[in-house]
Amino acid sequence: MELGGKSPLIVFDDADLDLAADIAMMANFFSSGQVCTNGTRVFVPAKFKAAFEQKIVERVGRIRAGDLFDESTNFGPLVSFPHRDNVLRYIAKGKEEGARVLCGGDVLKGEGFDNGAWVAPTVFTDCTDEMTIVREEIFGPVMSILTYESEEEALRRANDTDYGLAAGIVTADLNRAHRAIHQLEAGICWINTWGESPAEMPVGGYKHSGIGRENGVMTLQSYTQVKSIQV
């Protein structure tokens, strides 16, 4: 049983920022943000905040929203108008609680956007852990950028959630990757990538994000029982 998440993506201070920005885009805007494993809490070293924000803004500017039958389109509408309205309420709450909008923050307008449940790709910065948009699953195209000072702080705050479905890190240091990934309380973890889920990879979460696993050999455990025999 998989029950959603509020997954962290930690960009470490040795990471390639272009790679990190590409991963953050995939982790937030694939399927217009309607993915349970999305890495919507993006933790960035404070000293790289401005540079990272610039790279995200540039990439959001290259998103092509529109007719889904057009092969060049890579961003579509949300599943329904009620869901769109719920996402917009979260965006309004983010503004109310003091997060700063870098991109988006409203419905998409103009020709071709009148008949769909469109929400613009939205990026918040200056976020804090207590904000509603950081605590609750939105299931829409909304990224929250948070800053940190140390690896220990980033890992502690990444785990400070009721959810534990997915998590990811971006780093050039393999030793750091192994050290950090084993401290993250999440059932699905990625290093220097996001979202791939091969058939043999078990999928499921910790804490409130679910019970059990699907995919891989572990799936069989849901359909079998243990029998103990002594002779």
Image: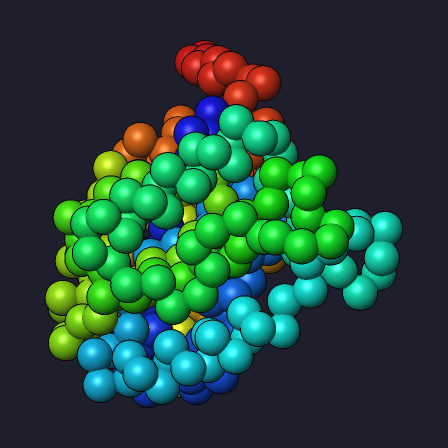
Residue 219 in sight in this render: no
202 relative to 179 in the view: left or right? right
Q: How is the image coloured?
A: rainbow
* Residue 74 at x, y percent in the picture: 70, 60
User: Which image quadrant: the C terminus?
Assistant: top left
Q: Residue at x 49, y 45 (%)?
A: 140
From the viewer's side, name the closer residue of 219 and 90.
90
Residue 101 in sight in this render: yes
92 relative to 83 in the view: left or right? left
Q: Residue at x 60, y 30 (%)?
A: 80
From the viewer's side, name the closer residue of 45 and 54.
54
* Residue 5 at x, y percent in the picture: 38, 40
Q: Residue at x 28, y 63 (%)?
A: 100
* Residue 17 at x, y percent in the picture: 42, 84
Q: Residue at x 63, y 67 (%)?
A: 63
* Residue 130 at x, y percent in the picture: 15, 48
Q: How many marks?
A: 0
Farthest-out residue, front: 110
- Residue 22, compared with residue 86, is above or below; it is below
161 relative to 101 in the view: left or right? left
From the viewer's side, name the closer residue of 214 and 210.
210
